[in-house]
């Protein structure tokens, strides 16, 4: 698995999901509890109010001379006087006209709920729909049974509960959004040091810094210190490895020179001429490998060295001047944008790469060499080195980057240049492409820009 990209998801997303779940559970719990508590509370309030009204109605009920029920005064709640208001009462005595509230302009209430001196209630059908009906049975002075019933439309209770639920949902939704916004703000603030750490690592990786810079919270500071120690130690290891490799190459030069000298003597002798030639060929191959490894150890290994980056065309100008002196009969031209271009490659590596390509082009060019710089496009800077020489065949291009490849022994060189150029591009994550149109050769290098 690539640790750089990662497949375990975003830490920010994890925190956001955790906060979202927590807010959802909290808001859901508040909504469920609040609706249950309110529904219970308002139901108790309605029942208490109706029980008060039914007892008030019983106290106000009187019988006239004929035994018919009458009220000494209207009920205290004026809603019982409004036609079809949803608040109704009814008093009935067997054999007498039923006394109804002014609000009950149609229908009637079921007097069966008034069957006991104790207040009872049921859900019944009323004049305007299901009603919460309360009733009690009283005995008049003449012994008649008086059925006292009072009712309220159940929709009144349901509407109050629904209105509360709507207001509660709006309020809780607003609260949830505020909590989520606060959570996002807290996450952004809390993870900001990680963003700064990522930027610092990017600067080191791109060669704009040689250590992780900035101040960090105490929880992250030890990690930053360890990373800086690792970067420093890694640079020291690379430096020591270069020194050791260089020392090894230099230590082999002397015995190899002795072997070469002896091989030349054998070659010049009549009896051992063939053996001398074989020894010389093998000594030359060993010398090429030593030169190649020695050249590679002088360059930066791997990705761009922390703390450095290359700027074009600034870096190319002194190289072009050197090439004009080295190949005075050739013209070296530069085609570059007006603004500086930064490349994510160690300047030592890029200098070596340009020197190799320009020198190689100068050796084969008929009259001119052009260094063209363009970009960045899509994050890549394109560097082209073109000459007007004889070019190369497809077979020659395929072998051009092999160690020790020389197509014309009369042309000065060791056959290592393009092999080293290829390795520099590979280490820097760049691409190197060689193309020939029959006349002239073009080497194209694409390197990540900043």
Image: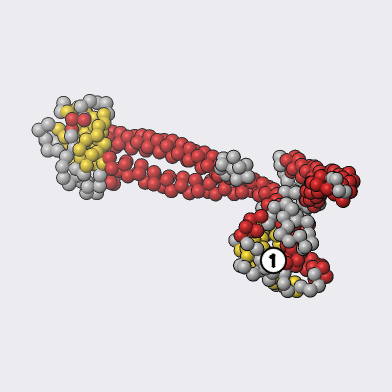
Q: Position of residue 76 (x, y in %)?
A: 30, 43
Where the N terminus falls, by quadrant? top right
Q: Residue at x 73, y 40 (%)?
A: 223
Q: Position of residue 58 (x, y in %)?
A: 25, 34
In the drawing, does residue 137 fall left or right of residue 351?
A: left
In the drawing, does residue 153 fall left or right of residue 17?
A: left
Where residue 352 sits, quadrant-wise, is: bottom right
Q: Position of residue 75 (x, y in %)?
A: 27, 42
Q: Residue at x 61, y 42 (%)?
A: 2
Q: Nearer the viewer, residue 365 or 378?
A: 365
Q: Position of residue 237 (x, y in %)?
A: 80, 42
Q: Nearer the viewer, residue 347 or 402?
A: 402
Q: Please indicate, yes or no, whether residue 157 appears anywhere in the rendered image.
A: yes
Residue identified by numbered label 1 = 385
In the drawing, does residue 383 fall left or right of residue 283?
A: left
Q: Which type of secondary structure does the marked residue at label 1 adopt? A: strand
In the drawing, does residue 201 fall left or right of residue 264?
A: left
Where residue 234 sits, quadrant-wise, is: top right
Q: Nearer the viewer, residue 273 or 334?
A: 273
């Amino acid at each position: 698995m690539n640790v750089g990209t990662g497949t375990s998801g975003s830490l920010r997303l994890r925190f956001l999901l955790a906060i979202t779940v927590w807010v959802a559970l909290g808001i859901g719990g508040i909504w469920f509890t609040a609706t249950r508590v309110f529904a219970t509370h308002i139901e108790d309030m309605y029942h208490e109010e109706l029980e008060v009204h039914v007892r008030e109605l019983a106290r106000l009920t009187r019988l006239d001379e004929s035994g018919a029920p009458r009220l000494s005064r209207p009920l205290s709640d004026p809603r019982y006087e409004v036609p079809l208001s949803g608040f109704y009462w009814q008093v009935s005595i067997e054999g007498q006209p039923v006394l109804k509230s002014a609000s009950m302009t149609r229908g009637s209430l079921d007097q069966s709920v008034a069957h006991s001196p104790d207040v009872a209630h049921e859900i019944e059908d009323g004049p305007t729909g299901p009603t919460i009906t309360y009733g009690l049975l009283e005995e008049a002075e003449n012994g008649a049974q008086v059925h006292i019933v009072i009712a309220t439309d159940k929709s009144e209770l349901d509407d109050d509960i629904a209105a509360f639920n709507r207001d509660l949902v709006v309020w809780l939704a607003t609260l949830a959004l505020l909590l989520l916004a606060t959570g996002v703000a807290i996450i952004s603030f809390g993870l900001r040091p990680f963003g700064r750490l990522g930027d610092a690592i990017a600067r080191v990786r791109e060669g704009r810094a040689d250590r992780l810079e900035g101040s960090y919270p105490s929880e992250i500071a030890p990690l930053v210190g360890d990373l800086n120690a690792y970067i420093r130690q890694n640079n020291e290891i690379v430096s020591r490895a270069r020194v050791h490799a260089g020392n090894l190459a230099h230590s082999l030069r002397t015995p190899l020179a002795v072997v070469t000298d002896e091989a030349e003597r054998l070659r010049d002798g009549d009896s051992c001429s063939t053996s001398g030639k074989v020894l010389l060929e093998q000594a030359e191959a060993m010398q090429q490998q030593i030169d190649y490894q020695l050249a590679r150890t002088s360059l930066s290994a791997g990705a761009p060295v922390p703390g450095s980056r290359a700027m074009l065309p600034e870096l190319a100008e002194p190289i072009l001047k050197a090439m004009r002196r080295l190949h005075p009969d050739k013209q070296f031209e530069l085609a570059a944008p007006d603004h500086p271009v930064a490349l994510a490659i160690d300047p030592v590596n890029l200098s070596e790469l340009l020197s190799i390509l320009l020198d190689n082009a100068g050796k084969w060019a008929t009259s001119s060499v052009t260094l063209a710089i363009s970009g960045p496009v899509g994050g890549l800077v394109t560097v082209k080195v073109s000459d007007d020489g004889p070019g190369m065949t497809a077979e020659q291009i395929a072998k051009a980057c092999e160690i020790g490849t020389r197509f014309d022994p009369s042309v000065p060189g060791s056959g290592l240049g393009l092999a080293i150029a290829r390795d520099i591009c590979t280490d820097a994550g760049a691409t190197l492409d060689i193309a020939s149109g029959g006349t002239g050769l073009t080497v194209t290098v694409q390197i990540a820009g900043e």
